[in-house]
Image: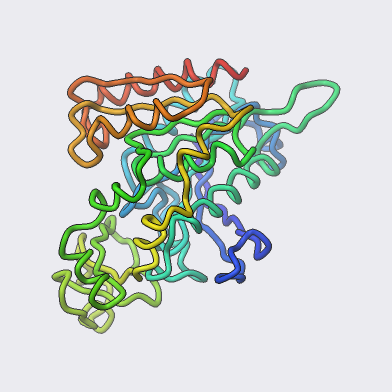
Amino acid sequence: MRLRHVFVAVPATDAVATDPASRELLAIVATPDAADDEAEASGGFDEVLVYLHGFPDMAVHPAKATFASRMPSKLAEFWLQRSQPHPRAAFIAFNFGGVPGSDSHLRFADKAISKELEDAVAVCKYARRHLLQSDSVDAPPGKLHVVGLSTGAIVASLLRDQQVADSITVIAGLLDLAGGVQFDFSPLQLEQCAASGMCWKEFYLPQDCPLPKNAELSLDGVHPTTELTDSGSDRIPGKLYVRLNQRYVHECQDGSLDIRRAVSGTSLPPLLVVHGDADKNVPFHNGEELFAAAAEPKTFLAIPRANHLLSNSKHLKRAMRAIEEHVAVVQ
């Protein structure tokens, strides 16, 4: 498997009015070892899978050409191996704006799901332009598939009516975004937002990962500190807390991000909803509610005893088999 960093621009014209500046996202493109250099340079792949990571998480290591977490690594292996012996598939994962590697123009404090939706649209357009085979008399256009996990599943659901993907898979998703705030934020964090317009959000850094840029940090989730930035990278812990402005929470609660509308329209791409019935982070009934609200074509996969991250390899393999069957529908 070949891995290479790329940068994806989120154009200013795609940005919301309150944030008109363009920004840049760090991504990693994975292609089969047998892929020829011409396909690498100019596209020509038959299928591309785009992965959307959760929150707080990242998909791409900012300092190394490697994945930063288990899910994108396993998905890339699955996606590229299934294409053998015809090496015509590519995989792309990226860090949402504000996450290390994608934080040169957007601070972690200013993150919002609406901006992550913009990021996802921009990456899908990038993949179509630079990786997929274009429509021609000799061959049909390539297909683009999206898989989102947790908060990435929220973004993937909102992406269903954006006309950029040929199929959507959501793992551990939900329908009620306002109610889902309690899954991502503790009572203390919500109290902090109400009292001071911000909270200290936990974040996990892989080994050798730089600190978020231009970020206010805390070691205990209560008190700010400059110890990390003053002492250098040799003392960076695996878990820290980063300032996140209240807008992230408000946007989830104000109804502006309407998952029901996004998944229930007409002429939508096929949707696969995957949920473990032992998920303690986003309980199982949330996946059932999302599936019930979604329009056809749709498929539901319940995985007995599976947790939020499908940590058991057997559970993840079952999800991957379902994804393989799901994308085959649009070939």
Q: Is residue 230 left or right of residue 323?
A: left
Say which quadrant the C terminus sits in: top right
Between 99 and 101, the residue placed more toward the observer is 99
Q: Nearer the viewer, residue 65 or 10?
A: 10
Along the horizontal axis of the image, is 273 left or right of 229? Answer: right
Q: Position of residue 175 (x, y in %)?
A: 38, 39
Residue at far right of view: 137
Residue 48: x and y in percent read 58, 33
Residue located 46% across and 67% down the image: 103
Question: Can you give x and y, in whole percent of width and height, for residue 177 in the image?
Answer: 36, 47
- In this rendering, would 308 be left or right of 40? left
Q: Nearer the viewer, residue 301 or 145?
A: 301
Frontmost residue, 288 versus 172: 288
**Colour scheme used in the picture?**
rainbow
Question: Relative to 128, does residue 328 appear above or below in the rendering?
Answer: above
Q: Can you say whether 162 is above or below 317 in the image?
A: below
Q: Position of residue 140 (x, y in %)?
A: 75, 23
Residue at left offset 28%, top offset 80%: 229
Image label count:
0
Residue at the (23%, 69%) spot, across then down: 236
32 relative to 151 in the view: left or right: right
> In the rendered image, which quarter is residue 113 located in?
bottom left
